[in-house]
Image (cartoon, rainbow, N blue to C red):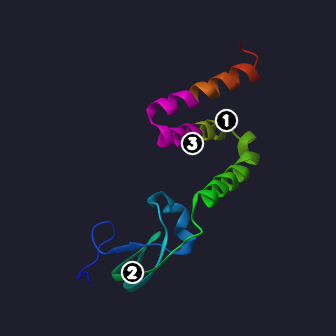
Amino acid sequence: MVESIEPCRSGIHACRAVDLPYWLGLGDLWEVELGGVEVDDRKLVARRGRLVRQVEGWNEETQRAFVAACAERAEPRGAQAPEIAQAAGFVSARVAEVAGGASAYDAERRAQADWLIEALDLG
């Protein structure tokens, strides 16, 4: 058991279901029982915790479906401002980088440039 808790420094850190989008980069998901809980913004910090069960539904198929759902919600906003197109390009390049390294980032940016050159008849 942890004697004192301080967000981001000590204690058992967890989240509520509503905060999952902020935590998905951590890998596996588990349900936990917590004791001595304090709420800090988008996280829970507790003095003690016990893993209850792994959330089996968070797998490659669900991850792909989540990405598709995010892209589907973002797509209609694409024409609202140039910054949205810029953000979408950046996100896509960062996804490539996380999956395949710096060269994948560069390759995605080149693919974006090729798309724009063709779509805008700049070739």
Q: Amino acid at mark 3?
A: Val
Which of pointers 2 and 1 indicates the residue nearer the eye? Answer: 2
The kind of secondary structure element at disc 2 is strand
Residue at image mark 1: 82
Who comes first in sequence, dot 3 or dot 1? 1
**Measuring 50% from the left and 42% from the top, which residue is drawn there?**
99
**Residue 42 % position (x, y):** 47, 69
The kind of secondary structure element at disc 3 is helix
| Local crowd size for mark 3, using a 10 Å CA cut-off: few (<14), some (14–19), many (≥20) | few
Tell me which segment is drawn in magenta: 90-108
State yes or no: discs 3 and 1 in contact (Cβ < 8 Å): no
User: In the rendered image, which quarter contains the C terminus?
Assistant: top right
Structural distance between the alpha carbons of marks 2 and 3? 33 Å
Structural distance between the alpha carbons of marks 2 and 1? 41 Å
For residue 42, above or below residue 119? below
Which of pointers 3 and 1 indicates the residue nearer the eye? Answer: 3
Which of pointers 2 and 3 indicates the residue nearer the eye? Answer: 3
Q: Is residue 30 left or right of residue 112?
A: left
Viewer-proximal residue among 71 and 104: 104
**Measuring 52% from the left and 40% from the top, which residue is drawn there?**
94
Q: Which mark is residue 38?
A: 2
Q: Which mark is residue 91?
A: 3
Tag count: 3
**Residue 66 % position (x, y):** 64, 57
For residue 74, above or below residue 90? below
Magenta stretch holds residue 106 = yes
Q: Amino acid at mark 2?
A: Glu
Q: Amino acid at mark 1?
A: Pro
